[in-house]
Image: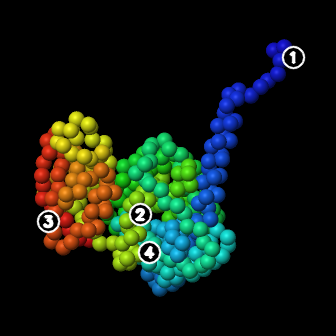
Amino acid sequence: MHPAQELTPNTHPDEGEALDAYSRTVMGALQTVGPSVVFIQVKSKARNGQERGGSGSGFLFTPDGYIFTNSHVVHGATELSVTLSDGRQVPARLIGEDEHSDLAVIQIWAPNIAPAVLGDSAQLSPGQLVVAIGNPFGFQNTVTAGIVSALGRSLRAESGRLIDNVIQTDAALNPGNSGGPLVNSRGQVIGVNTAVILPAQGICLAVPINTAKFVAVALIRDGFVRRGWIGVAAQNIDLSTRLRRFHQIENSGAILIIGVEKNSPAAKAGLREGDALVEFNGSALNSVDDLHRLLLSVRDEQECSAKIVRHSELVDLQLHPELK
């Protein structure tokens, strides 16, 4: 090499700008949602009667102090306290929890709080940038970033029931992140962080915010969620234009059945893996969230109609959901 030649980094001139844009996006999301994120400390009784402590994350979502977190964070709590982003520590009360979706709502009374803006998880796409904010190991307002790795995953809750349509992300989560927000690039909450798959690395799951919204309505209204259960695992799919036109249905999407539990209402009604649910009780089903919402309105001993696409044919079925 000639002495006059200089070594220069092998970096494209636009890479620095791209990194700056990425950093600005992450910092913007943190600045927007960070004031809404809280650290939750939990006291509960162990089986031997001794008091034990735990902690997790949560985020404010209403001006009157309602906070989303995970059911497994607050389950069995005898005392709850919340530390806000500005350092204030206030007591909290449990409004209700739903073990089947691993969601809970607690409430605080404090002035000058900043609720987060809730987005639309139905608009997510794989590869989209997401930011996770929480309090792992008590380190408040820790931020990590990644992408949406996949959509439509299923996660078995501690209750044993499957949580459908969860968001898979590679944003690094640790103990204490549970209950914190998963945020898009615009600073809108699109999920509630709930689980890390161990021993795998880079596989973290969040409950979609659209699911959390209707669970919150039931928890705030009744303190619990009672829903119809049909016994399927499902994920969202698109419907082809040909199928929609042939069967004269208005759906933009449908629900693909990927599992049917033995002796469940779905099994008794004749639902099979590979069926595509397009209608339930006269309402179109474009996503798993639509089915969850409709199952919340099911009553005792109610017979429900359903329409499925099976091998390109439209089939009518009758189901008797169980209330759980």
The quadrant where residue 233 appears: bottom left
Dot placed on the residue nearer the N-terminal end, 1 or 3 = 1
Amino acid type, residue under disc 4 in the picture: His
The answer to whether residue 10 is above or below residue 285 is above
* Contact, mark 1 vs mark 3 (Cβ under 8 Å): no
Is residue 200 among the parts visible in the rendering?
Answer: no
The answer to which of marks 2 and 3 sits earlier in the sequence is 2
Residue 4 numbered mark, or none: 1
Category of crowding for the residue at label 3, using alpha-carbon neighbours closer than 10 angstroms: few (below 14), some (14–19), many (at least 20): few
304 left or right of 108 in image: left
Element under disc 2: helix
Residue reaching furthest to the bottom: 49
Distance Cα–Cα, label 2 vs label 3:
26 Å
Residue with the mark numbered 4: 75
Residue at image location 29% in from the left, 46% down from the top: 253
Residue depicted at 40% across the width and 54% down the height: 166
